[in-house]
């Protein structure tokens, strides 16, 4: 079985997340994708992180494909959300299956700083979502060779795969800024998630301006 691993803060989840995972699921022919919200992000600071319960609920709204499974394994873990711990846990649970770690190009370009990153590369295929431009592709291939020692003649190298996506410029931080500025989220966030954020007064909803 081919199992995708898609982690993140999902603070909140948006259509960029959904688009990425849909493309990867189809392209890699994944049998299952584990959607894993972080408890404590280890690669970035987040001062307005929603409660675990709320982020988990929003993930359940966003990721409805029968192949998707929402996992609380990182939220339940006492330690920080280091990816190697998740990969090792999944290797024990699925010893005969192939793991595919799905990340964005921004995270890939600091992959050498990840805790025990070499072991992650040994245990799973790192699948990188990239904008479909020559500049982006070349920078990812150069990084893989210079920092990770992996030669990528095209879009694939040893345990690394680049998946090309059309540009979709949106981030969770931008969404939170839009909420603070009372700007529309039309087209970038699922309406059910907007309703959830409003009803639970997340990210400034319901506060007097």
Image (spheres, rainbow, N blue to C red):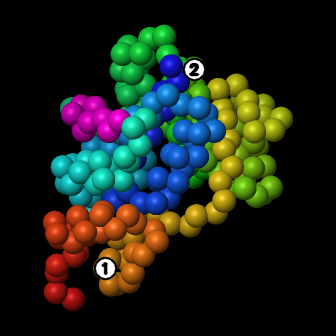
Quick check: can you spot residue 173? Answer: no
Queried whether the magenta region covers residue 16, the answer comes back as no
Q: Which residues are magenta?
A: 69-77
At mark 1, the secondary structure is helix
Q: Does residue 196 appear left or right of residue 85 in this picture?
A: left
Q: Which residue is the site of mark 1?
A: 180
Label 1 neighbourhood size at 10 Å, few (<14), some (14-19), many (20+)?
A: some
Residue depicted at 54% across the width and 39% down the height = 25
Residue 62 screen position, x and y as percent? 36, 53
Label 2 or label 1, whichever comes before in sequence order: 2
Instruction: Give the alpha-carbon distance from disc 2 to disc 1, as whole Å.
Output: 42 Å
- 5 vs 44, nearest the viewer: 5
- 137 vs 111, nearest the viewer: 137
Residue 106 screen position, x and y as percent? 57, 52
At mark 2, the secondary structure is helix
Asked if the residue under mark 1 is in contact with the one under mark 2, i.e. CB atoms within 8 Å, the reply is: no
Residue 174 screen position, x and y as percent? 43, 70
Residue depicted at 41% across the width and 43% down the height = 65
Q: Which residue is the site of mark 2?
A: 122
Residue 24 screen position, x and y as percent? 57, 41
Would you place residue 161 above or below residue 56 in this image?
Answer: above
Queried whether the magenta region covers residue 70, the answer comes back as yes
Q: How many marks?
A: 2
Would you place residue 12 above or below residue 112 in this image?
Answer: below
Would you place residue 120 above or below residue 186 in this image?
Answer: above
């Amino acid at each position: 079985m081919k199992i995708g691993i898609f982690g993140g803060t999902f603070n909140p989840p948006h259509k960029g997340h959904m688009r990425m995972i849909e493309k990867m699921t189809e392209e890699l022919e994944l049998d299952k994708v584990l959607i894993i919200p972080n408890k404590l992000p280890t690669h970035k600071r987040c001062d307005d992180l929603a409660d675990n319960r709320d982020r988990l609920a929003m993930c359940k709204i966003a990721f409805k494909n029968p192949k998707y499974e929402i996992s609380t394994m990182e939220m339940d873990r006492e330690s920080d959300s280091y990816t190697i711990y998740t990969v090792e846990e999944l290797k024990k649970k699925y010893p005969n299956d192939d793991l595919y770690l799905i990340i964005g190009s921004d995270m890939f370009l600091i992959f050498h700083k990840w805790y025990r990153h070499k072991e992650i590369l040994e245990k799973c295929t790192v699948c990188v979502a990239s904008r479909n431009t020559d500049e982006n592709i070349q920078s990812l291939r150069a990084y893989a060779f210079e920092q990770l020692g992996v030669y990528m003649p095209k879009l694939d190298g040893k345990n690394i795969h680049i998946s090309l996506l059309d540009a979709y410029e949106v981030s969770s931080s931008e969404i939170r800024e839009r909420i603070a500025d009372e700007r529309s989220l039309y087209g970038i966030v699922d309406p059910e998630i907007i309703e959830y954020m409003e009803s639970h007064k997340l990210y400034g909803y319901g506060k007097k301006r």
